[in-house]
Image: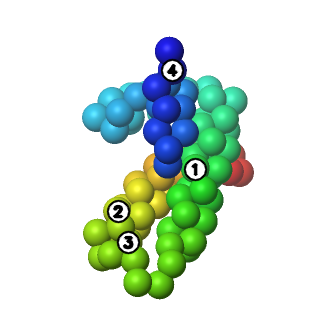
Amino acid sequence: MAEYDEYMGHVDSAPPPADSMDNTLAKASEKELRHWLRDATKRADTAMARRSALPPGTSRARVTTANARWASVAEYRDLLARELQLRGLTP
């Protein structure tokens, strides 16, 4: 059964963890990178929308958590875009 995270989506569809990311990105095809970028962009947009939807008076902990979730997926999205640019491709 596929694991599901409310903010990140299906965890099983995500690429490997950051410690092996450099090696994974180097071996990934353009098609894989574009797929991962599309998925990461969608996740970043979702996290941003959830962060923006927090009502006034939300606890500092919830705001910090929402910011951290967005920052995490946005950083991953930027990493994939940078890899495509390094290969001379347009993200």
Task: Please name the residue that numbered disc 4 is placed on.
Answer: 2
Give the mark toward the camera: 2 or 1.
2
Callouts 3 and 2 close, C-beta under 8 Å: yes
Look at the numbered disc 4 and give the secondary structure of its residue: loop
What is the CA distance from the residue labelled 4 to the residue labelled 2? 24 Å
Sequence-wise, which precedes: disc 4 or disc 2?
A: 4
Sequence-wise, which precedes: disc 1 or disc 3?
A: 1
Image x and y of residue 87, in percent: 59, 42
Q: Depth check: give the residue in front, 45 or 76.
A: 45
Callouts 4 and 1 close, C-beta under 8 Å: no
What is the CA distance from the residue labelled 1 to the residue labelled 3? 17 Å
Image x and y of residue 54, in percent: 50, 73
Kind of residue indicated by mark 4:
Ala
Q: Identify the residue at horizontal 54%, vertical 27% (top origin).
A: 13
Image x and y of residue 72, in percent: 40, 55
Q: Depth check: give the residue in front, 61 or 80.
A: 61
Kind of residue indicated by mark 2:
Thr
Look at the numbered disc 1 and give the secondary structure of its residue: helix
Task: Please name the residue that numbered disc 1 is placed on.
Answer: 43
